[in-house]
Image: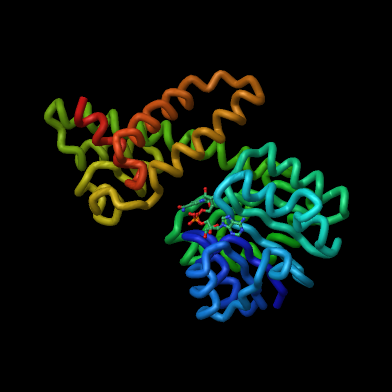
Amino acid sequence: MAKAGFIGLGNMGGPMAINLIKAGHQVAVFDLSEAACKQLSEAGATVAESAAAASEGADYVISMLPAGKHVAGTYLGDDGLLAKLDASTTVIDCSTIDAETSRKVGEAAADRGIGFMDCPVSGGVAAAAAGTLAFMCGGDAASFEKARVILADMGKNIFHAGPAGAGQVAKACNNMLLAIHMIGTCEALEMGARNGLDPKVLSDIMLASSGRNWSLEVYNPWPGVMENAPASKGYQPGFMVDLMVKDLGLAMEVAEGSGVDNAMGQLARRLYEGHQGGGNGQRDFSSILERLKAS
Ligand code: NAD
């Protein structure tokens, strides 16, 4: 059993922290939202007055925050956690943020002898609740070995991607590819349907052929083809368009920073931004099919 401080108890962090409590860890929590703290208090967590108070004496500090500025604000500077934590603490930031901020926090942690891993996740709210998230981790080998012990109580697949920031790069690569193959899958299905094919039959054909991909396998964007997919539930998320646009923005930063000509990724970003601008930000990302239907 470990002592963990958990910061950021939103849609993802809340259920992740609850899984740590269920696994028998002693969990102290902090969030700016009182409602989020109350929910965790009812689940058995100790609610702290600040991030620093939640982290006091913790073996692990875990954060699940919206963006890089929140992570930098939490850890860096004279008032940041890294200035206060004991060197025996392992810091695990699960937020999806820019790789640059993760590297900066990693360097600041290393300067103080504190282990740091950026561990963004794949899998949405349902996977967070079920404890089946995939973690893509960046940091040194010793911190990874410590982190994986507690990550195993929140997830199923835990990968060491490389040094600090590598987890964010892996996540950016994955989600850029996801956006591209979701749009490609929608285009193929719409083209088939307009030419008289049944989308279910076409899906079965492509699943057994070289067009096979994750969107077809588990997340078919055509309503009614796959009973449990968001497309069959009015495109309720799932994974929101707003979050896909955020992740594509992070992917563009990674591509620009390394001089990669990611033409397909850039186009996917433009298409998703257009879809978001049409009032679809809170809908599932597979609803991009409707953009094609309107064309
Ligand atoms: P959310 O907005 O539901 O939760 C964020 C929480 O952080 C909120 O409760 C907010 O009050 C709290 N917070 C913000 N600033 C804080 C601070 N300085 N100190 C303490 N608490 C603070 O977001 P979410 O959906 O839980 O996402 C969290 C992260 O996980 C994001 O980086 C997101 O991109 C990533 N992610 C989300 C999903 C998803 O499906 N929701 C999937 C994969 C990854």
Q: What residue sits 50% from the left and 59% below the top?
A: 12
Residue 206, percent across and down? 30, 35
Quadrant occupied by the C terminus: top left
Q: Quadrant where the N terminus lies?
A: bottom right
Q: Is residue 205 left or right of residue 246?
A: left
Q: Is residue 227 left or right of residue 100?
A: left
Residue 197 in view, yes or no = yes
- How far across and how far down the image is residue 136, in percent? 62, 49
Quadrant of res 162: top right
Asked whether 125 or 224 is in front, the reply is 125
* Relative image position of residue 73 (x, y in whole percent): 68, 50
The picture places residue 30, in percent across and down from the top left corner, at 62, 67
Q: Residue at x 58, y 54 (%)?
A: 65
Q: Which residue is depicted at the point 55% across and 54% down?
A: 134
The residue at the point 55 percent across, 33 percent down is 251
Residue 184 showing in the rendered view: no
- Of residue 167 and residue 227, the one placed in the foreground of this image is 167
Q: Quadrant of residue 205?
A: top left
Identity of the residue furthest to the left in this view: 196
Which colouring convention does the figure follow? Answer: rainbow
Q: How many marks?
A: 0
